[in-house]
């Protein structure tokens, strides 16, 4: 039966029903009303039933969606809070790292400054020490050169003395030769021939004496030369001793 026809029957049932006096009510047949309702249920199309089921499913989906949304929103809020906390932690870590880096840079600059000051001080101390050592070295060299000069002067004096002794020996030898020549000349020019043998004997004796004298003079010359050599050697020994006495160890002691 058509759904609209059943609705009309329901309307007719209400119109034809008996009215109650003094009230806006009617009396209808209960059985007939239920019959029409049953027929309405039967007459309801499947689309209406499906639509009703769809509505029910939609409501269920909406409820599930709301619950899921709440869960998702709660999870999102939790993640957001975690991210905020992580961001705060990262920001705090960055701030601390910046502070540590700045402190490290300041400490490094301070250490570099102190190191530069220490280096400059050591350089200045080294310069002062080097200047002092140079002064001590100059004094040492001056003293050494003065001593060497005195030794050289003494050596030169010894050489001059030896040369003078040699000159005196040579002069004496030359004078002896001249005297001997003069004596021989005078004897040759003598007036008595009978005394020639005696003169020859005398000449021979004089010659022997002269040879002895020459040998003595040669021995004296040899001794003088040995004395000069000894003086020269003594001067050299003294000069070497001066250098040994003023070695670098004495230089360190004088510092």
Image (spheres, rainbow, N blue to C red):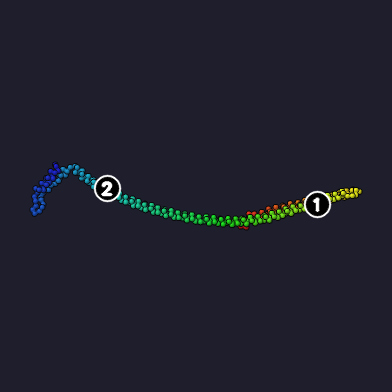
Find the residue positioned furthest to the bottom.
Answer: 254
Q: Residues within 10 Å of mark 2 (few under 14, many from 20)?
A: some
Q: Position of residue 18 (x, y in %)?
A: 8, 50
Residue 183 is left or right of residue 36, and the answer is: right
The mark nearer the N terminus, 1 or 2, is 2
Confirm whether residue 145 shows in the render. yes
Of 190 and 93, nearer the camera is 190
Q: Which residue is mark 2?
A: 65
On-image quarter of the N terminus: top left
Q: How many numbered discs sit on the rendered protein?
A: 2
Residue 72 is left or right of residue 44, and the answer is: right
Q: Residues within 10 Å of mark 1 (few under 14, many from 20)?
A: few
Local secondary structure at mark 2: helix
Residue 221 is marked as: none
Q: Quadrant of residue 151?
A: bottom right
Q: Position of residue 133 (x, y in %)?
A: 59, 56
Residue 248 is left or right of residue 164, and the answer is: left
Identify the residue shown where x is 80% and y is 52%: 175
Asked whether disc 1 touches disc 2, contact meaning CB atoms under 8 Å apart, the reply is no
On-image quarter of the C terminus: bottom right
Identify the residue shown where x is 71% and y is 53%: 156
Local secondary structure at mark 1: helix
Q: Position of residue 209 (x, y in %)?
A: 84, 51
Of 142 and 6, nearer the camera is 142
Q: Position of residue 46 (x, y in %)?
A: 19, 42
Confirm whether residue 212 shows in the render. no
Q: Which residue is mark 1?
A: 175
Of 238 and 46, nearer the camera is 238
Identify the residue shown where x is 14% and y is 43%: 3
Above or below, comparing residue 8 to residue 136 in the picture: above
Which mark lies nearer to you, 1 or 2? 1
Above or below, comparing residue 88 to residue 53 in the picture: below
């Amino acid at each position: 039966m058509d759904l609209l026809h059943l609705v009309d029957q329901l309307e007719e049932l209400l119109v034809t029903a008996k009215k109650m006096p003094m009230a806006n009510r009617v009396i209808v047949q209960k059985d007939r009303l239920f019959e029409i309702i049953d027929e309405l249920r039967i007459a309801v199309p499947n689309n209406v039933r499906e639509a009703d089921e769809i509505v029910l499913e939609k409501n269920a989906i909406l409820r599930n969606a709301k619950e899921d949304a709440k869960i998702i929103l709660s999870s999102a809020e939790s993640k957001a809070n975690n991210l905020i906390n992580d961001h705060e932690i990262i920001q705090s870590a960055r701030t601390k790292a910046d502070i540590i880096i700045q402190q490290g840079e300041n400490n490094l600059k301070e250490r570099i400054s102190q190191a530069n000051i220490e280096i400059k001080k050591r350089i200045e101390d080294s310069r002062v020490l080097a200047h002092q050592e140079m002064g001590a070295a100059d004094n040492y060299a001056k003293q050494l050169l003065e001593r060497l000069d005195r030794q050289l002067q003494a050596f030169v004096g010894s050489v001059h003395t030896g040369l003078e002794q040699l000159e005196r020996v040579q002069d004496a030898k030359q004078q002896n030769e001249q005297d001997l020549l003069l004596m021989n000349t005078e004897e040759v020019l003598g007036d008595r021939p009978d005394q020639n043998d005696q003169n020859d004997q005398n000449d021979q004796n004089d010659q022997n004496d002269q040879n002895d004298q020459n040998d003595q003079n040669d021995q004296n010359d040899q001794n003088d030369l040995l004395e000069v050599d000894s003086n020269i050697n003594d001067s050299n020994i003294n000069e070497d001793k001066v250098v040994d006495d003023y070695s670098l160890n004495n230089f360190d002691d004088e510092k």
